[in-house]
Image (cartoon, helix red, strand yellow):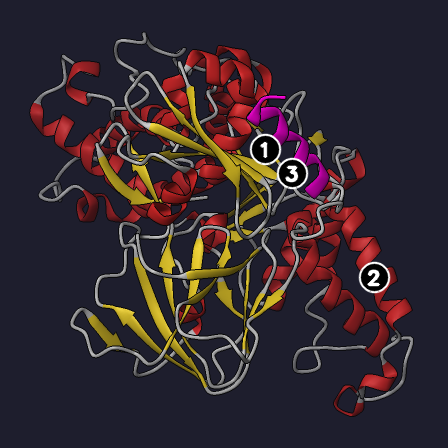
Amino acid sequence: MTAIAEIRKEVEQIKKGLNDRVRPGQPIRFSEASAPGDAIRQGDLYIVVVDAVPQKSGYSQVEKLGEEHRQLVPGNTQGAKHALDSLQGVEMWRPNTWNEDILDGPYIRCLQERTITHPTHGAVTIPKGFTVKFRYQKEWDREQEKERRARD
Amino acid sequence: MPKRTIPLSQVTADDIDPEVCKQYADKWLQNALRTDQMTKEDFEVCPTHVVNMYKIADLDPPKHITYIKSPLALAVAGSISACLWYLDENYAGVCEGRENLSESEQIRRVRLAVPELVREALKCDPWEDKQNSVFISCMRAIMETCPPKFYGADEIAFIRPLETEVVYDSYKLVDLAKLFPNEPAEVIDDLENIFAAGFKCCAQHYDMWQGGNQWSAGCSFLDYWTEEFGATLDGKDVFSDFRELALRSGARIVHQDFVIISDRPDRLCLDEQYRPHSTDGPSHRWTDGWSMWYIDGLAVDEQIVMRPETQTIDQIDGEQNNDIRSIRIDRFGWDRYLIESGAEEIDVDRDAVSGTYQALYRTKRDENRLIVACPTARMFSLGIPATVRTCQEAQKWLAGDEKINIIGAT
């Protein structure tokens, strides 16, 4: 059987809930034992545990969090709707440039447990006390001959 | 009379019966999904409810109330009619330096601009009005609702048919000087200013928008609280007329001087998750022909749904949205996609997180494609630089070449 046929078969199994490791919409929670560098992939968003928010240029702490800060990926497509369930107990550092071309997203420090939701992917829960950064999956654009942010 | 006699301020969670809530939710869900057309009775009764709503808001009744078939025609006709009401009073505000222009010349210039403006506004939607049906529908509604000095009754018969393709380029704003070669530069300037004002109104049409049956979700809550507990606003029943309109019609544009009411779609196809979805025709269609094409809740186009085999590899690989690219290939055929891409398998292994197969292909265009199974039960084809040689390297590259340990995927 060709690789494509194998992958297609596995997609069918995922659809039917027969894959024992991944299920459509399956929620995941970082274990309290997670270490810096551990990451969960929610579609094209990588949620990466870090020690602390690095003091690096190009980032600023958001002074007053508003509803718009719940969305963690710039853009209006369905794929950009990775969102925090609430901003309560959240401190956030955002890149100073916030547009659809960036590959590095915000950092958040969770003073209480928070969940990241998405319309098609499962929710990802971040335990209280964790600091995470968000990174966007990239993709090679042959036409432009450069990498760009993947979008769905 | 409300069914319950508890004052609203004293209602607790114990007073809310989930079964009763579900009845309201079901009623309004059915209303949102209706595809039957407005009846004679609906057409007769809606104006009364509109006038009542204006009365509740302490406004004079609108001067004109008319109907239209689709929300696209509604948005365009309502916006341009609103623009004409503004131009009626402020021609010189839109077209600077024309304080002394005669009214008859103002009217002539507006009438030159309006049909072209409607055509341009319709081009903003990817659906093509090949039959001119939405255009005619818009013009009729504009004529019926704009200040009467601009259009007399029954003028719809004199609307010019669609011009040649040379003038109407889908991607460019119409060249007004080319379209009206005999008009002096001053008139062309005015037409351009009227266009700018018209587009501004189109861009802000939602300020005048009320969703009718499309706003059934909000109505379900208001219906529950008014029917079950007698909710009012400052002692006034402000919801009854709004509810009747939502039950009898589609979206409407509500302006100080006019109201245009649209009908419901005649085709609406959803999947089991209530997402718009159809693989054998448009997911939404209104009786003037305006259609929308969706698969799995994602906006696609007619070609992807009806003629997927005619797609090219350039169209597929050039698609920026991964979900839509996946749909494109599903419908084109994965095997054919790989053959026509000239793809050669260079690595196959199992994804460390999901345990599913993934494969890396080199295409004849000197790039790689990583084919993966997503936890959302979709196959993706991801662009990877030609320098990457294995699936593992490709996954690392996608993540930004950082040293991270992926412990889960969803």
Q: Which residue is mark 3?
A: B276
Quarter occupied by the C terminus of chain B: bottom right
Amino acid type for the residue under numbered disc 1: Tyr
Start and end of the magenta stretch?
Answer: A1-14
Q: Which residue is mark 2?
A: B24
Instruction: Evaluate whether residue A152 shows in this view.
Output: yes
Q: Earlier in the sequence, mark 3 or mark 1?
A: 3
The residue at the point 22 percent across, 72 percent down is A59
CA distance for labels 3 and 2: 22 Å
Q: Secondary structure at mark 3?
A: loop
Q: Are there few (<14), some (14-19), or many (20+) residues within 10 Å of tag 2?
A: many
Amino acid type for the residue under numbered disc 2: Tyr
Chain to which mark 2 belongs? B
The residue at the point 46 percent across, 64 percent down is A39
Say above or below: B176 vs B121. above
Q: Earlier in the sequence, mark 2 or mark 1?
A: 2
Q: Are there few (<14), some (14-19), or many (20+) residues within 10 Å of tag 1?
A: many
Amino acid type for the residue under numbered disc 3: Pro
Chain to which mark 1 belongs? B
Say above or below: B134 vs A31. above
Same subunit, tags 3 and 2: yes
Toward the viewer: A75 or A25?
A25
Q: Which residue is mark 1?
A: B294
Q: Position of residue B111 (x, y in %)?
A: 31, 26
**Position of residue B72 in the picture relative to residue A107 (left or right):** right
CA distance for labels 3 and 1: 6 Å
Quarter occupied by the N terminus of chain B: bottom right
Q: Position of residue B36 (x, y in %)?
A: 78, 33
